[in-house]
Image (cartoon, rainbow, N blue to C red):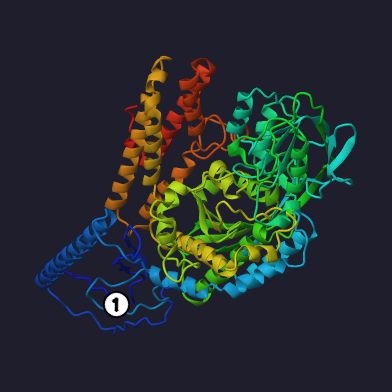
Amino acid sequence: SHDCLSTQFGGEPTSYTRFSIARQTDGDNSHVEMNLAADEEEGGETGRPEHLHASMPPPRRNGKNLCFIIMAAVLLLLIGFLIGYLSYRGRMQRVNRCLDGSGNCEMTPTASYISDVGTDVEEVPGSRILYWPELRDMLSAKLSATRLEASLRQREGKNSFEAGKAEDESTASYIHDQFTSFRLDDVWNDEHYVRLQDKGSSKNQVFIIEDGEEELESPDAYVAYSKSGTVTGKPIYVNYGRKEDFQKIRNVRVPMDGTIIIFRAGKITLAEKVANARKEGAVGALMYLGPSNEKKADSCVPFGHAHLGTGDPFTPGFPSFNHTQFPPVESSGLPHIPVQTISREAAAKLFGKMDGEKCLQEWTSGIVGCKVTVSSSNKMTVKLTVNNVMVDRKILNIFGVIKGFEEPDRYVVLGAQRDSWGPGAAKAGVGTAILLELARVISDMVKNDGYKPRRSIIFASWSAGEYGAVGATEWLEGYSTTLHAKAFTYINLDTAVLGSRDVKISASPLLYSLLEATMKKVKDPTRDSGSLYSRVGSDWIERVVPLDLDNAAFPFLAYSGIPVVSFGFYDEGDEYSFLGTTEDTLANLKGKTDKLYPLMRTAAEVAGQIALRLTHDHELFLDFDRYSDELLSFQEKLWHFDSHVKALGLTLNWLYFARGDFQRAADALRRDIANSDTENRIVRRALNDRMMKVEYDFLSPYLSPKDTPFRHIFFGKGNHTLQSLLENLEQLGVNKTSVDVNELKEQLALATWTIKGAANALVGDIWNTDNEI
């Protein structure tokens, strides 16, 4: 006879798997989530049935009965397996149809379980389900224009919030306390010791020298990082100070060596204008505000900085932490010539003294009697004295975080500049108010409404933004080895309202699709009906404004390779005249638009929706196919230079091949997403990481971040950029001998292999890379 051992089983399962398909209202992809409902996820013992088992002595069974029981059990297991497999296969087919665009994907739940179409939703213990449309509506309902107004009014009655000084530190403390009161998961300070420039004990002065010396102006405003000293030279007006403006001066054979260049604000940054003037041999530079409908702006003198870069120029490429010692180095972007801003009134008086050629018709300066320079017989000169002094200051960046529930080490960052030379209502007040409101609302949604973001949301208040995004850049430099692998989007909130008629957008192509989907769901505050998308139109991407050095989002994109978006309202052709002056007050900003607070609320809603969508969905809403379009557009611009390049014994084919490799790599990633098990968290994370790295992989790896900090080939600064390559090829068509062939070869090599490297990274595994090049 056979002895049979019987065992007694009791207790309950420790985990189980739930999965289903979710549809999105305004997205492109569906997502399937698997939830392992362990004890802590289901609220401990709450709502769980107890399984009671009586203890009985095991009955005797002979061997034949035991064999039948085993066979029956195996048969039941096989039937159960087949049912489960067929059910799973059906679900994944629907997922794949959704991912490849052939299905309709409408909603993604915050929670992990929703029923299939046509069945009832099972009651699930724990937090309730939040669908994306519900989450979007909740954000809109909670945003308060009244609270935004209250935050903005915190700056009233104060004349300056200069970085590192009392009012800046007081505001930093207020923001820290607000973050704490909002019950963010963590709140902390980030200290940096930076070298800034302040005005000296005596004012800077501008003189007109004819028979004698006449003071033109001695403004309170100054230009940070200007060289201190006194220079004298003939005045020459060069419109906006762009390269093409200087070329027109060269065309009329007006010598610029040893002169003082005058330009008006706008088009490019002050630092870029100064750098162009220095290249032409100028000894000094003056800038005034352009024409405006505001008469009281005629006497305003703007502040500014002349550093052609971002961050502390005396620790280039390194973070300015107190414990770090540096040799005496400085950024190559410092101007090394005196620079000063003047009022429109002073500029008009100076033009009145100039008797040379009249300004070109397209150079209308908004000032009657505009002249390019003085006549050859006129001995009039301009004397500029700058007394700025260098100072070392401690600045504080303030951070708060809502930690993600699934991937806390992946985060989106929302940031706003806090400091300003004047009251800074538009420059820093609007962005700071939006930052605080979003922190309050999103935290409330998490703490009280059951929203569980998959990824973390960081709120950042930057100091020393007026000096060239110093606070933001120093933070990026301090964590340069890790941030690009963790932060997948930066949302800039600065200067979100400068008018009301037009929408100004600067963004990475990776975020175009998300931004468009967002604008379709946000109401236009200036109209009774319609969305923001109906205002910007379907061709809005053609009007995307390139980021400049004065935008805090620029170092995130060009230095760290993190996708960015900057969104705001303005009046094209009628700029807010008081930006960056001591007259940037709440009263003047409200005079510019009577819908200030509704516009702020709308800007907050756009930023909030982007942040929530990026932390809500399984798959990151980063459209890497957009870079395929950008590369194709660039290739089309190169085609008519083929013959010029071949004449030098070179070819553009390798660059075309690299572009094709990137297109194939993007197609391969799209297929991987469609064919992968999207219920698997490890698989999802791997796919999302490949999308996250796309931006970073366009930073040229062949350049030193210390010597060339802005390495992005699309949005950086330097000879390595695609724009610089295009300019060199255009010059080749104009004058072959003026082009350095070796420099052109290096540009082609850098562009080709950076694009090829980005393609290889997008593919994923090394054995899947396309090595045909």
Q: Which sits in the foreground, 248 or 769? A: 248
Q: Which sits in the foreground, 73 or 679? A: 679
- Residue 513 locus on image (x, y percent): 40, 54
Query: Tag 1's secondary structure?
Result: loop
- Residue 644 locus on image (x, y percent): 41, 19
Task: Answer left or right for 224 relative to 43.
Answer: right
Work out whether residue 644 can be spotted: yes
Q: Quadrant of residue 348?
A: top right
Instruction: Give the residue pinned by disc 1.
Output: 121
Query: Quick check: 109 above or below 771?
Result: below
Query: Quick check: 264 above or below 146?
Result: above
**Disc 1 residue crowd, few under 14, some 14–19, many 20+, Cα 10 Å:** few
The amino acid marked with disc number 1 is: Val
Q: Which sits in the foreground, 69 or 704? A: 704
Q: Which sits in the foreground, 88 or 585? A: 585
Q: The C terminus lies in which quarter of the figure?
A: top left
Residue appearing at x 48%, y 38% in the figure:
714
Residue appearing at x 36%, y 29% in the figure:
656
Task: Answer left or right for 404 relative to 69.
Answer: right
- Residue 616 locus on image (x, y percent): 43, 63
Tally of numbered tags: 1
- Residue 42 locus on image (x, y percent): 41, 75
Q: The N terminus lies in which quarter of the figure?
A: bottom left
